[in-house]
Amino acid sequence: MELNDVGHGGPLGGTSDRELWARAVDGDREAFGRIFDRHAKAVYNHLFRRTADWAEAEDLTSAVFLHAWRRRTETVLDRESALPWLLGVANGLLSNTRRRLRRAEALLHRLVSHDEPVGDHADRVAGRVDDERRMSEIHRALARLPRHEREVVELCVWSGLDQQAAAAALNVAVGTVKSRLHRARQRLGADILGTGPGPASSFRSPSPDHAKEVAR
């Protein structure tokens, strides 16, 4: 189920993604855990909107952050935010790999905690099924778009990136993002672009406390 996204760059006056990433490059697992805590919900929501499958979105989110830890020394952030790069990784994994996800999730357990309050399981399952049904309907509408236009809708409209950040995630010019988004709006209209599941809380939001348990 979809969640309320956290801020893309962290709280004003707080430690920026760029600072945290520099510490992670030096091996600071707690700093990487804070990056995870800051952006995991936004990455999960992006992947759920693309897959319409909560279980696959959870698995792929684990894979995105495992990949990010392993490739952190090669990362170039967009301004002060890690989110555009993370969403670019998410798109690549979704397009090219849907295997070894169970292993990735198990390894990520060693990076962050997956504890969650106990709730009503039946209500959570019903909500997830409803969200998946609604996202499937939206996917059928978006299927009318060319892939390059659909990608900018997913990044700018659903995941809340500005056009510059979306351009960084897609590795294209800002003007290209602008024109693609304009054409997508013309094809679909405002109704579909504003549609999506409401916020929920079933994704297991991690705590950075156990970040030092990163996989070797």
Image (tube, rainbow, N blue to C red):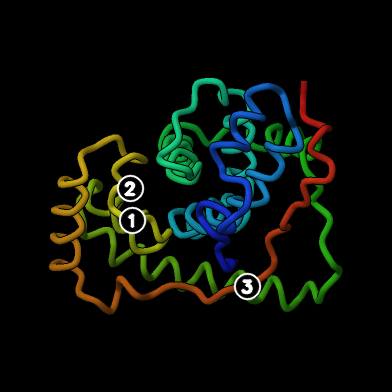
Q: Most extreme residue toward the front, as rendered? A: 13
| Residue 133: x %, y % from top left | 49, 71
The quadrant of the picture occupied by the C terminus is top right
For image coordinates 33% across by 47% down, the residue present is: 166
For image coordinates 62% across by 46% down, the residue present is: 15
Name the residue nearer the viewer: 120 or 163: 163
Residue 6 higher or lower than 17, as above or below:
below
Circle 2 residues within 10 Å: few <14, some 14–19, many ≥20: many
Circle 1 residues within 10 Å: few <14, some 14–19, many ≥20: some
Circle 3 residues within 10 Å: few <14, some 14–19, many ≥20: some
Mark 3 or 2, nearer chain start: 2
- Gap between marks 3 and 2 measured at Cα: 25 Å
| Residue 205: x %, y % from top left | 72, 57
| Residue 129: x %, y % from top left | 59, 71
Amino acid type, label 1:
Asp
Q: Nearer the viewer, mark 1 or mark 3?
A: 1
Q: Which residue is mark 3?
A: 200
Amino acid type, label 2:
Ala
Name the residue nearer the viewer: 96 or 204: 204
